[in-house]
Amino acid sequence: MTSRMNLAYVAMAALVMTISGIPAARALSFCDIYPNRCQYTPSGKGYYYPHGYRLPSETPGFGAGNASNQAWGCAATDGKATGGSWSFPNRASATYGALSACAKHGGNCRIVSCSSSVHNAYEARAILFSTAHR
């Protein structure tokens, strides 16, 4: 009898959530939890590299010439909210990263600064946001 009652309670709870319009939680990916362990293609697809595995950008001989040293980063703002990105392989993906980070906190964001030498969050603060507010 208790298993029937438990099933009935679960069904009622699901019905109440469905009728009230409570959205289901968005599933997290590894790239949401460890963004510094992900690399993105120009199309925006993320590839997660587990701890203990080297990122392609950390592998000697990756890229051609000076391209392996480039780490693009951008800053975006809507006047109130800001968003930044760093360590992206190209400007397009860094722009998308900054706009999506800003859009999580605000509305109509725009790119205010980009640089090809932003390797981490500290450099992003120093390089991008210091030039964005001048």
Image (cartoon, rainbow, N blue to C red):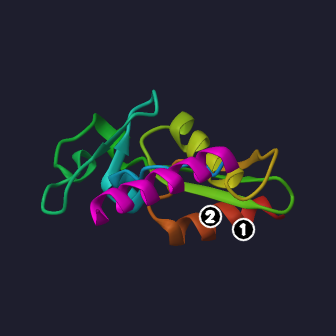
Res. 77 visible in picture:
yes
**Amino acid beneath label 2:** Ile
Q: Nearer the viewer, residue 48 or 64?
A: 48
Looking at the image, do the residues carrying marks 2 and 1 touch, with CB atoms under 8 Å apart?
A: yes
**Amino acid beneath label 1:** Ser
Q: Nearer the viewer, residue 46 or 27?
A: 27
Quadrant of res 50: bottom left
Image quarter in which the N terminus is found:
bottom left
Residue beneath label 1, please?
Answer: 130
Quadrant of res 94: top right
Residue at the spot x=46%, y=50% of the render? 11
Residue positioned most to the top: 43
- The picture places residue 82, in percent across and down from the top left corner, at 73, 60
Q: Nearer the viewer, residue 23 or 12?
A: 12
Distance between the alpha carbons at the discs numbered 2 and 1: 6 Å
Instruction: Examine the rendered structure and indicate whether residue 130 appears above or below residue 65.
Output: below
Disc 1 secondary structure class: helix
Give the residues drawn in magenta, as a range: 1-20
The crowd level at tag 1 (other Cα within 10 Å; few <14, some 14-19, many 20+) is few
- The picture places residue 59, in percent across and down from the top left corner, at 17, 49
- The picture places residue 101, in percent across and down from the top left corner, at 62, 53
Residue beneath label 2, please?
Answer: 127
- The picture places residue 25, in percent across and down from the top left corner, at 51, 53
Image quarter in which the C terminus is found:
bottom right
The tag on residue 36 is: none
Residue at the spot x=69%, y=54% of the render? 102
Disc 2 secondary structure class: helix
